Image (cartoon, rainbow, N blue to C red):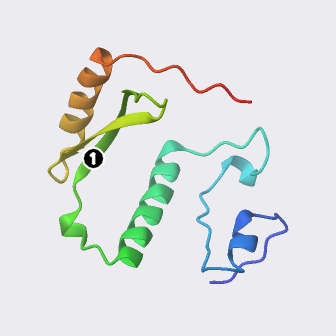
Amino acid sequence: MDTVSGACHVAIFMGRVTRAGMIFVPCENGISHNEVENAEPGDLRDGCNVLLHAMLEQAGVDEEGVMSAAALPCGLDDNGLPIGLHLVGPRFQDPKLLHAAQLLEERLPRIAPPQLR
């Protein structure tokens, strides 16, 4: 469905070089693009699921093959580049995977955020 918006989104410019779209979620009192914008967590979750399923469909991924995953920062290499750890678990095992990620994160060294120039 085509919609018209007065807001200028990056999708306008990306649409010049590739297909682009936007996912809208309900906001309290219809207010968006404002510091008082407020959306319910369930609506945000639903919007994220729409995005996930659209991406999987575009990638040709069978949803039966989707697994739980988490990424953890583990440190920096000798050049100061980040090193990460990916945890992958069975489908629908997010709580177990997130618990394992939390335990690992508690034991991994803290990484200072990069200094912006």
- Vertically, is 105 above or below 58? above
Say which quadrant the C terminus sits in.
top right
Residue at the far left: name it.
90
- Vertically, is 84 above or below 30? above
Q: How many labels sit on residues?
A: 1
Across and down, in percent, residue 115 comes to 65, 25
- Vertically, is 4 above or below 99? below
Residue at screen point 62% across, 68% down:
22
Q: Quadrant of residue 109?
A: top left
Give 11 or 85, whichever is nearer the viewer.
Answer: 85
Give 44 or 59, whichever is nearer the viewer.
Answer: 59
Across and down, in percent, residue 14 comes to 69, 72
For the residue marked with disc 1, what is the amino acid?
Answer: Ala
For disc 1, the neighbor class at 10 Å (few under 14, some 14 to 19, many from 20) is some
Residue at the far bottom: name it.
1
Residue at screen point 51% across, 52% down:
43
Horizontal side, residue 40 vs residue 14: left or right: left
Q: Quadrant of residue 77?
A: top left
Across and down, in percent, residue 27 comes to 66, 51
Residue at the far right: name it.
6
Residue at screen point 59% across, 27% down:
114
Say which quadrant the N terminus sits in.
bottom right
Q: Quadrant of residue 110?
A: top left
Element carrying mark 1: strand
Residue at screen point 18% across, 54% down:
91
Horizontal side, residue 18 vs residue 33: left or right: left
Residue under pointer 1: 69
Horizontal side, residue 29 vs residue 42: left or right: right
Give 51 or 107, whichever is nearer the viewer.
Answer: 107
Across and down, in percent, residue 38 comes to 66, 42
Give 45 or 13, whichever is nearer the viewer.
Answer: 13
